[in-house]
Amino acid sequence: MGIVRQLRSVFGRRCGEEGPGASAVRPPRIGEPSVPIEGVDPTGRPVSIATGEGRVVLVFLTSSCTPCQPLWTGSPPQGAVLVTPSPTTESRRRVEHLARPGQVVVMSSEAWHAYDVHRAPWLVVSDSGTVVSDAPAPSDWGPIGA
């Protein structure tokens, strides 16, 4: 088995793929406290997202994920926060190019770890500090914005 196949079998790093014990097997975080998010925007400025009050829609995307592309190009609902991995693994320039003007984007691998996200696109909704949705994201913004 080639090294790339071995790595994929261990890590499942291709978009939409899951590695052993990844997100489809893990229990959803519904009912658990939501975690505030800290990272940077695509220009490198610090960003913090509080998740303790009101409804917060977190959409975990990558710039190279094919199923993520309609979410990058569509019109997200107001208040949606796009969360990508940190600039150490995700291109800030590419994310800046993909993000719509005015769209809140946080580049934070720590958020991916805190919410135990293993694939993209993934959707987490927090309401008043509690996770109320934790599942693969729909293929477009329609169901998210409803």
Image: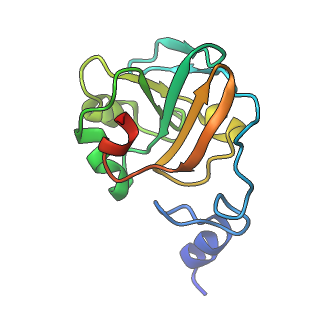
The chosen color scheme is rainbow
Q: Nearer the viewer, residue 103 or 127?
A: 127
Which residue appears at 61% of the width and 53% of the height?
Answer: 118
Task: Report which quarter residue 51 is drawn in.
Answer: top right
Count how many numbered circles sit on residues in the image.
0
Which residue appears at 60% of the width and 36% of the height?
Answer: 109
Look at the picture and state if 82 lies above or below 135.
above
Residue 16 left/right relative to 2: left
Look at the picture and state if 134 lies above or below 36.
below
Q: Quadrant of the N terminus?
A: bottom right
**Residue 92, position in %: x, y?**
39, 30
Task: Report which quarter residue 50 is drawn in.
Answer: top right
Residue 20 left/right relative to 38: right
**Residue 64, position in %: x, y?**
37, 51
Which residue appears at 68% of the width and 70% of the height?
Answer: 10
Which residue appears at 56% of the width and 16% of the height?
Answer: 54
Residue 71 left/right relative to 109: left
Q: Nearer the viewer, residue 127 or 63?
A: 127
Task: Report which quarter residue 94 is drawn in.
Answer: top left
**Residue 47, position in %: x, y?**
52, 14
Q: Nearer the viewer, residue 4 or 72?
A: 72
The extreme front residue here reads 146
Look at the picture and state if 12 lies above or below 76.
below
Q: Quadrant of the C terminus?
A: top left
Q: Nearer the viewer, residue 69 or 94?
A: 69
